[in-house]
Image (tube, rainbow, N blue to C red):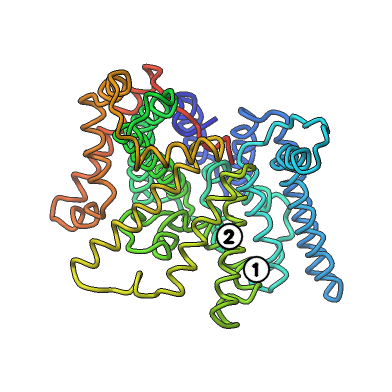
Amino acid sequence: MVFSSMTFLCVFLPVVFGLHCIVPGIRAKNAMLLLASLVFYAYGEPVYVILLVISAFFNYLCARLIGRAHRAGKLVLLLAVAGNLAVLIYFKYTGFLVESFNGLTGMNVPVPVIRMPIGISFFTFQALSYVIDVYRGHTAVQKSFWKVLLYISFFPQLIAGPIVYYHDVEREISGRQQTWEGVSAGLRRFSAGLCKKVLIANTMGLVADTLYAAGDSQVNILLAWTAAVSYMLQIYFDFSGYSDMAIGLGWMFGFHFKENFNYPYISGSIQEFWRRWHISLSGWFREYLYFPLGGNRKGRFRTVVNKMIVFICTGIWHGASLNFLFWGVYHGFFLLLEEYVPAIRRAGGPVKTVVQRVYALLVVCLGFVFFRVETMGRACFWVGRMFTGFSFGAEGMALLLSQLTPVYLLTLAVALFACVPVKKIWEKKPAGEALSYVFSLCGLVLCVLSLAGGTYNPFIYFRF
């Protein structure tokens, strides 16, 4: 089940929210949310809900052992890390590893077909953060397995993030307040995220998918750039829209998650981009990989090496293919470049600011081509056509023009407008906040009508 479905919007959410309002006592509310979260996951993964529970119990048990066995704590932590990574590798990377082995050795080992559990990368990293924080002494051991299971399986952030740390929600699991202000603000935030997903990301995604399915002879420079820009907007509004929905749902139930996106497309460098894009993921890697490797405390060269390791892992985290590995190395290279040539990211006048932002957008846009296209060869072909595709055949131009509909062009204008922080300026106006509620309500109605009509509604998190 996904947030942008009629089942969730018209059945699951109203029932669960209503029960949370009327069920008395925090224990009963938690029990209801836990059951609802497991039903939410089982709706799409009826078998793998068992894996989710086993994973939560394994990490709960490891944390309890770390709390009791001070001398053996490090050994238990290593066991927890190995166990979590083993599950992640088995379900997500086995096929890729076998294919790579066959390619390197010339052997023909059968490639196993293993269906990946939805959201396994998110709930595995979340569980790992809890155990590591217990070992570090940043989080107290939770003696109740049910609270740990609720933390890991809570449906707003279960399948698409943001990655939540246990110490950020520990108090709210044990005792929270569900206020009218929180509910109304949460519903507004949820509606805004749903609009991002349904009205913008889906429109951009339909065009991107159509253009990326074009034949080689049809692809010219205009078509290639339209496809790349459309996908860049799709992935941002899809990811940030789901984060907005998760944060809004949290507010509605009395939980507060940290922000996950902060207008990344206004960045003036790749370093700044990663401070604004998927903040919970980059924060996780910084906290649990970059700092343990030494961070920036051991000289510039070691800093660059550590950053490259982090971004290789970031690429691999997103998927089991050479494209994702290259995407991580690609971003690591530009971080390395900015480390050794700081003038690239150093503040300057208006002209330099514009140049820096164009540079960052260009790097990100080209990188997302490798993120979107299935193979390295195809990705290189598309990037090549973005700079050399000057053959404007009738077939390719007809395909491109067929996608440049008034709906697409209007959505494109809205998307570009929404990529900059005008919302913050708007809400400072006297009537800005009140109007934002009106717009959110209208947007929610439009989204429901769109979904009821069975429009294009992909779920890109199946890859993660």
What element does badge 2 sit on? loop
What element does badge 1 sit on? loop
Query: What is the x, y in percent for residue 128?
Result: 68, 58
Left or right: residue 274 compared with residue 159: left
Q: Total number of numbered labels?
A: 2
Which image quarter: residue 446?
top left
Residue 113 can be seen in this image: yes
Looking at this view, is 225 or 253 the one in front? 225
Q: Are marks 2 and 1 in contact (CB under 8 Å)?
A: yes
Crowd class of label 1 (few under 14; some 14 to 19; many from 20; radius 10 Å):
some
Query: What is the x, y in percent for residue 177?
Result: 46, 54
Left or right: residue 150 compared with residue 241: right
Query: What is the x, y in percent for residue 120?
Result: 65, 43
Identified at 51% across, 35% down, the residue is 378
The residue pinned by badge 1 equals 139
Query: What is the x, y in percent for residue 380?
Result: 48, 41
Measure how far apart labels 2 and 1 are at the Cα level.
10 Å
Q: Amino acid at mark 1?
A: Thr
Left or right: residue 428 compared with residue 459: left
Looking at this view, is 36 or 30 the one in front? 36
Image quarter of the C terminus = top right
Which image quarter: residue 394?
top left
Q: Amino acid at mark 2?
A: Tyr
Disc nearer the start of the sequence (2/1): 1
Identified at 25% across, 44% down, the residue is 416
Looking at this view, is 457 or 328 the one in front? 328
Identified at 70% across, 67% down, the residue is 134
Task: Answer above or below: position of 177 versus 456.
Answer: below
Task: Answer above or below: position of 422 versus 167.
Answer: above
The residue pinned by badge 2 equals 165
Residue 194 can be seen in this image: no
